[in-house]
Amino acid sequence: MTIFALSYNEKILHFFMKIQPLFLSVIIVVLIGLNSCQEFTSTALSLFASTDTTMVVFPAPLGSVSDFEKILTAEQIRSLDSIIIQHERRTDNKISIVSTRSVKPYQSLNEYGTNLLDSWEKGDDKKHSILISFSKRLDEVHIITGSSLKRRLSDKEIKRIIKKSMQPEFEKDDYYSGLKKGLQKIIAEVN
């Protein structure tokens, strides 16, 4: 009977020769995974940096008043919501108020608001919709109307409501009063 005695170095070499195919397979899988991760990350980053607005996902409305910028108190939101609900019970109009900190990837709050309204209101519902979009951070306010309300609330009238009723209050950081006054003027015009 012949006994083969292997030295310590030979045992290590023999061990690595046995696991070499497995080790190479693992390395290949890891490298492929890293490459896929890099491609995914590159794609995700390009989507975030893109100005293509076809992929924009808007947040769901929080109710009639969606204060995403967290400017209003809960009581102020309830008060504005109550005014809107009373108006909507008497008409087929739908009014929404939304605040936002950012309009990216859009270039303006007006463009953002128009697309947000498209996202929230579909088909005939959009014809009877009004969206008041504002941003304290961007220092802007816009009123967007559906097609059937443009006759009752012209662009000239919208500018007047913003300039006379809303902006003076916004300049005093009293967003609630500005929104309430603007909302009341809008309702008076579309009734």
Image (tube, rainbow, N blue to C red):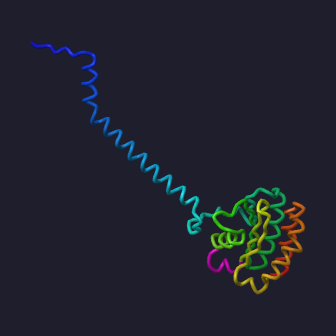
Q: Is residue 147 above or below residue 179?
A: below
User: Which quadrant is the C terminus positioned in?
Assistant: bottom right
View extreme (left): residue: 1
Q: Would you identify the image quadrant in which residue 96 lies?
A: bottom right
- Estimate the x, y position of residue 7 in percent, counting from the top left: 24, 15
Judge from the rendering whether residue 135 lies leftward or rightward of residue 30; answer left or right.
right
| Residue at 39% in and 42% down | 30
Across and down, in percent, residue 16 comes to: 28, 28
Residue 182: image location, x then y, percent: 85, 72
Compared across the picture, whether 22 is left or right of 128 comes to left
Q: Residue at x 57, y 67 (%)?
A: 52
In the rendered structure, which segment of residues is drawn in magenta?
121-128
Q: Residue at x 74, y 72 (%)?
A: 131
Name, please, the residue furthest toward the front: 9
For residue 95, what is the image quadrant? bottom right
Q: Would you say residue 125 sits in the magenta stretch?
A: yes
Asked whether the viewer can see residue 57, the reply is yes
Indicate whether 147 appears above or below 81: below
Relative horizontal placement of residue 23, taking residue 100 as reference (left or right): left
Above/below status of 132 relative to 174: below
Q: Quadrant of the N terminus?
A: top left
Q: Residue at x 29, y 36 (%)?
A: 22
Q: Is residue 191 visible?
A: no
Q: How many marks?
A: 0
Q: How far from the left and from the top, in percent, is residue 44?
A: 52, 56
Q: Residue furthest bottom?
A: 151
